[in-house]
Every structure is written in C-alpha cells, then in structure tokens.
Image: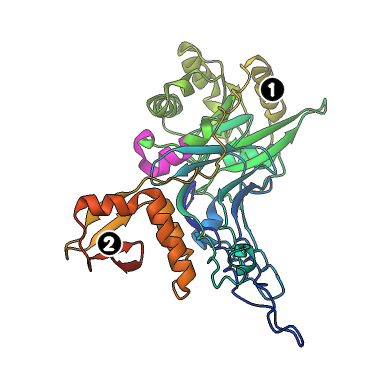
Amino acid sequence: MFLDEARLQVASGRGGDGAVHFRREKYVPRGGPDGGDGGRGGDVMLEVAPTLNTLSAFRRQSRFRGEDGGRGGSSNKTGHDGASVRILVPPGTLVRDQATGDLLIDLTAPGQTLTVCRGGRGGKGNARFATSSNQAPRMAERGEPGEDRSLLLELRLIADIGIVGAPNAGKSTLLAAVTRARPKIAEYPFTTLEPNLGVAELEDGRTLVLADIPGLIEGAHAGAGLGTAFLRHIQRTRVLIHLVDGAAADPLADYSQVNGEMALFDPALKRKPQVIAVNKMDLPEVAGRWEALQRSFLQAGVRPLAVSAIARRGLRELLFAADRALDQAPEAESPAEMPVYRPEAEPTDFEILRDPDGSWRVRGKALERAAEMTYWEHEEAVRRFQRTLARLGVEKALREAGAQEGDTVRIGEYELEWKD
C-alpha cells in the first residue's frame, strides 16, 4: 500500500537532574557545594533527504524520542547532553500539527531542517544556589521535561512534469523508457501503488524531472483507489503528460474521465498545460485505429502525439513537446513562508478546578513544569516551589476559591497539603 501520509509521535529528551553534592577532601572539613548541572535533553528534528521519495519508512517506525540528558555530578561536573534524533523525510513533505491541523512548514530543499521538539534544559546543581546568606544549599533542580507532540506528514512530490492517465495506460513503462527510474511494471492494472520519480536528459543538456502518478479511476477525487493521495502529487507539477491507452475500449472517454477527476479534486489542475500522447502504437490494432483516434481527439480540440513506450517510438518528440510546454508554463509558486517552529514563551497563566473527590487542581504549563523540576525530598527545594506559587498568585487564588486547611491540592502528578 502506498503511504503519502504518516502520523508520528515525537518527544524530546528530558533534561538531566542537577546534583546536590558537597566537596569532600582530606583537610577540607567544610567543602562548599559542588553539585553540577544536568545535561540538556536531545531534540527531535526533521531533515529533507533528496534520495527519498516516499513516507513508507514510517510504516515500521512512527515513534521517535530524543535521549535524556545526563545527571550532574560532583566537582561541578555537568551531565552529558542527550543525543538528538534526526528524522529523514523526502522533499515535498508538508508538516502539520496533528492536534490543531496547523501547517508548520513545507520542507522542499535538500538538507532543510525543522526542530519539532526541543530538549528540556538540565536542572541546576546546588552549586548554582549558593549565596552569601546560604553557603551550603541542600537543593537543586530536576531536569526540565521534554516536549511531545503528534505530527501529520503529507507528501507532495516535486517534479517538473507529471505523467497521468487511466490505470494500465503505460505510465511507468514511459517513465522507465525516458529515465533511469526502475518502477515495478506488470501486465495488470494498478501495478503502480506509489509515485515514481525519474530524470530525463535532453540532447541540449537540459534535464526534466518526471513523476508517474498511479492510475486515476472514476471517483478518485473522493478517494476511490487512493485517488486523493495520488492527486495531491499533481498539484506541484507545472506540466502534465496525459498518456492515453490506445488499446482501451474508448480512449477519448478515458481522457475525459481523468481530466474530470483532476478538476473535481482541484480546479487549478484543469488549467495545467497538457501534452496528450496515445500509447501502445506498437500494437497493430492500435496503429490501425490511429487515424480514427486522431480525428476524434481533434474534434474535441486536442492534438495528440502517437507513441509507444515499450518500443520507445515517438518519445523524443514527446519529451521536447513537454519541454516546450514547460518553457511557456508559469513559474511554480514558491512555497508560502511557513512559520518555523519555536518554543512558546513560558506561560504563567493557570486555572483552579475541583476534582470529583473535592480536591483542588491547579493547571498551568509553567507550574506543572516547575513541580516536575522540584526535588521534593529536599526541604529547601520545596520552600522554593512554595515561593513560586506565591509569586505567580496561586496561593491567593486558592484562598479566594475557598481552599481550607488540610485540603489536597494537585499540580500535575503531585499532591500537596494546603496550609494557610
């Protein structure tokens, strides 16, 4: 099965925990704090690999996670940074946030990258909390949690010329004949289940990038036969070679049906320049009906070319006709400027809710992150978190909401006892 969409679950690494440690050496009975910071968590990035032309690899793996940062050590040693993950995608990959549907970026250029999840920063060691009034702090920070998100990747191949037509019209055979592409070819319909790319070299040194689009059947615009998946790839092409099966019962009807499906999917496809070619002229029955076919196409306002992909006849004229159409076609629109992903500013907003058991729940990204970065086993770290609650107005808001002595307050995964 062809895969032109992929759903990925990605998560960056958590920052390493800062260390609580004090210098201990012979003849130094009161060494100062020397706990080091934790390392940064690994990022998750997408990178365009020009050798790829499908998202099929994501059938086997769809979850990716950056490595966690290392824990800080004694003697102010910083933990190691977590390894980042690079996910290779083909050119023409649109990246959307699955939760919101927002388009993050259109990855088209080889080597182009997008960081989709940034690793959490490492927690501070206790050496970072030493002050003149607190020279032996017994506190540190845990590493910042990583980010996670769901992504929807959508592939739209980038080619100068798209080869379209009904199933078994000989599109893959044509691509193989004019390029070095080696698509799977057999004598039955729907052999091609994913688009193939190839580069054709003209005599003057020019090159054309061609894509053969799997056959479009009736209802393709509504998804029949993976139609919408294939039609998306045509949107990026500038010119179409419309290959017609000369051995079909009604070649003109096939031609009209394919055009109709493209127009129903996207009216702009109807305006793309087309070079029409009747294939399989090596067959005596097709060659014998060529004049009648030519007349019927001319009456419909179309001047077709006669070709045989398997016998490689008429292909030079076809390529030069497509090249001339490409010269006259409007330049491809450059992709709209997409917002490169950047981490959001740390939000300090929060809301106070009641759980079904009567406990209080405080929700807020900054607060939940601060709770995860707190060493609850160290009293000084707990007092620091309490100061954070007061600074952000959480204590006041709980008091106004009616929190009573002894009530349970939940922040993220942690439960606290309210003391006014």
Q: Is residue 227 magenta?
A: yes
Residue in front for this viewpoint, 256 or 10: 10
- The residue positioned 71% from the left and 39% from the top of the image is 179
The answer to whether one can see residue 199 in this image is yes
Which image quarter holds the C terminus? bottom left
Residue where numbered disc 2 is placed? 420
As drawn, the label of residue 56 is: none
Q: Is residue 356 left or right of residue 162?
A: left
As drawn, the label of residue 323 is: 1
Q: Is residue 133 above or below residue 25?
A: above
**Range shown magenta:** 221-231
- The residue positioned 62% from the left and 65% from the top of the image is 130
Residue in front for this viewpoint, 404 or 250: 404
Q: Is residue 133 magenta?
A: no
Identify which amino acid the numbered label 1 is placed on: Asp
Where residue 309 sits: x, y (%)? 63, 36
- The residue positioned 23% from the left and 69% from the top of the image is 406
Q: Is residue 141 left or right of residue 102?
A: right
Where residue 304 sits: x, y (%)? 56, 20
Q: Nearer the viewer, mark 2 or mark 1?
A: 2
